Image (cartoon, coloured by chain):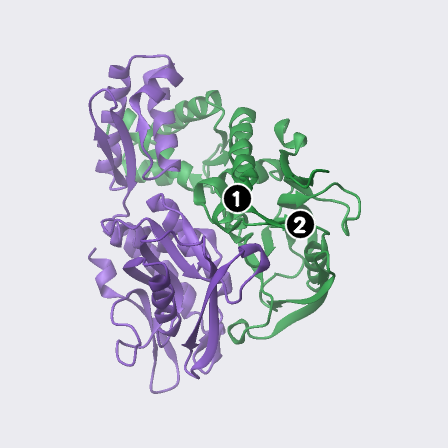
Chain colours: A purple, B green
Amino acid sequence: MKKTQRICIITHILTENPNRDFSLGTFAEQFGCAKSSISDDIKLVREAIDAAGLGYLETTSGAKGGVRYVPYISRRAAAHALEELRKAFEDPSRMLGSGFVYTSDIMFNPKIVRGAAMVFAKKFASAEADLVVTVETKGIGVALFTAQMLNIPLAVIRHESKVSEGSSININYFSGSADRLQQMSISKKGIPHGSRVLIIDDFMRGGGSILGILNMLKEFDAQPVGTGVVIVAGGRENKKIPDYVPLLILNDQEDGRQTVEINPDMLTL
Amino acid sequence: MKKTQRICIITHILTENPNRDFSLGTFAEQFGCAKSSISDDIKLVREAIDAAGLGYLETTSGAKGGVRYVPYISRRAAAHALEELRKAFEDPSRMLGSGFVYTSDIMFNPKIVRGAAMVFAKKFASAEADLVVTVETKGIGVALFTAQMLNIPLAVIRHESKVSEGSSININYFSGSADRLQQMSISKKGIPHGSRVLIIDDFMRGGGSILGILNMLKEFDAQPVGTGVVIVAGGRENKKIPDYVPLLILNDQEDGRQTVEINPDMLTL
C-alpha cells in the first residue's frame, strides 16, 4: 500500500473515532508495514489536521505508542455553525406565541446539532467528563453527538419510569414558567456512582429541568462538571441555576418579536 | 500546501460529511490550487477508501464537477459491529424477567449505535429515503446516526402532544404484549407531505409501535421505504407488520434463558 493511501485511511479512521486511542501497532499490522512508517504517516496527518484547524493528534511514544484524534472546531467554523443555528431558530414561522418556538426539526437535524455539539466538545474538552446526561427528548441529538466527540457514553433521563429500566430513581421537579410539577426517572444502573457528568440540554427557560438533573446526580454521588444548553430564553436573572453555557439567547423584544443572538463567549473559545 | 496535506484534509472533510456534495471548486479555492490537482487528489482518496472497503466516492465531472463520500461498512466490519452489539445485549445482568431487557446504556452508547446505523445505512442505501422517522425515546440514537450517514433529517414522533410542537396529528395504537392503548403525536410540520420515509426503531415485540408509525405516515401521505429495528423479540409469527429488517433476534429458550443472535441476512449484505 502506498504512503498516500495509508495517510488517507489513517485520517479516515481517526476522524470517525474522535478521542479514541489507536496503537501504532494496529495500523502497522493492518497495512503490513513498519511502525516507523506509521509514525511518519501520523506526523504528516498531524501537521495537515493542525494546519487546517480541524483538530489535533495526541501521540504517545514508546512500545505502547499510540495516537488519538481530538476534534477541534476553529473559531471561524464555530462562528459559521452558530450562525447557521441562529438563523434556523430566528425563522418567524417557528414562533408559536407565548415564547414557545417550534424546534424539533432543528434539534433532530444531524448536520445542525453536530455543529452545536462540536462547540460544546471544544468548550468542555478539559472538563474530564466521563458521562453526558440529558433529559428526554429534544436534547438527545446534541447530547449524543457531544458524547461521540468526547468518546464517552450518554445517559438519558426519562419523564416516567419504564419497566425496561429495572429499579429506578425518581425525583420531582418544577418546570417551566408555570412551575408545573414534573417527574424525572432513570435506572439505578443509568449513572455510575461518582461519575463526572457533563449536562447537555436543548432549551432552558427558568432552569427547572437542569436543577432537576443536578438533584438527580446527587442521588448517584455524581459530580456535574459543566452544563451546556443550545438555546436559553432571556438573561441570567430569574434562573434557578447559576452556571450554564448557552450557545444562543432568545430575547423577547418590546414590540413582541423574538430575537435570537449568539452567546458572544462562544465566538472567542 | 503539499499534496499529502490536501489528501488528508479532503479525506477528513468527506468522512465528516457523508453523502454530501462538495464541488471541486470549493476545495480548489480552499487550497489555492487548480481544479485538476484536486481532481487528482480525489482520485487517490477514492482508490484508498475503496481498497480499504470503507466506502466509495461518487464523482461528477464537468464545470459543476463534485464529489461525495458514500459510507459503506464492509462485511467484515459489519460482522464485527453486530457481534459487539449482540454481546452487549446478551449480558445476563440485563435480563429483567418477563422478556424485558435493560438496553438504555447500549442504545445511547455512541460507538455501538453508530455501528448499528452503519449497517442500516448500507441496507437502505438505495431506498432513496428523504427522512428517517422514529418514535421516542430509545431508538433516537441509532435513528440519528442513520440519518447522518444518509444525509437526511430525522423526525421524532412523541408519545404526547407538546405545546412546542404547535398543531399536531395524534393517533392511538396498541403496543406491547398487553396490547395497551397508547398515543403518538407529531407536529403537522414534522413530516413533509409525500416524504419517502425510512423507519428506524430500537426494539420490537409485536410490531404495534411500527404499525402506529405506518398509520401516522398515512396522515402525511408519506411513503414507507424501509423499516429497520435493532432488536426484535421472536420470529416473524404474530407480528402486526410484515416487512422489517432486524439486526438482532431475541429468543426465549425452553429453560427460561434468553439468547440473542445476529440476523444472518445482515452478514451477507
Assess disc 1: are there few (<14), some (14-19) or many (≥20) residues with their C-alpha within 10 Å of its C-alpha.
Answer: few
For disc 1, the marked residue is: B93
Q: Which of B191 and B227 is in front in this view?
A: B227
For disc 2, the marked residue is: B204
In the image, A44: left or right of B52? Answer: left
- Quadrant location, the C terminus of chain A: bottom left
User: Which quarter of the picture shows residue B16?
Assistant: top left
Q: Residue at x 34, y 39 (%)?
A: A18
Q: Do labels 2 and 1 share a chain?
A: yes
Regarding residue A62, the answer to whether it shows in the image is yes
Q: Which mark is residue B49?
A: none
Assess disc 2: are there few (<14), some (14-19) or many (≥20) residues with their C-alpha within 10 Å of its C-alpha.
Answer: many
Query: Where B49 falls versus B187 (above or below)?
Result: above
Dot 2: element? strand
Mark closer to the chain start, 2 or 1: 1
Q: Mark 2 lies on which chain?
A: B
User: Which quarter of the picture shows residue A175?
Assistant: bottom left
User: Whole-percent x and y of residue B189?
Assistant: 58, 67
User: Whole-percent x and y of residue B185?
Assistant: 62, 68
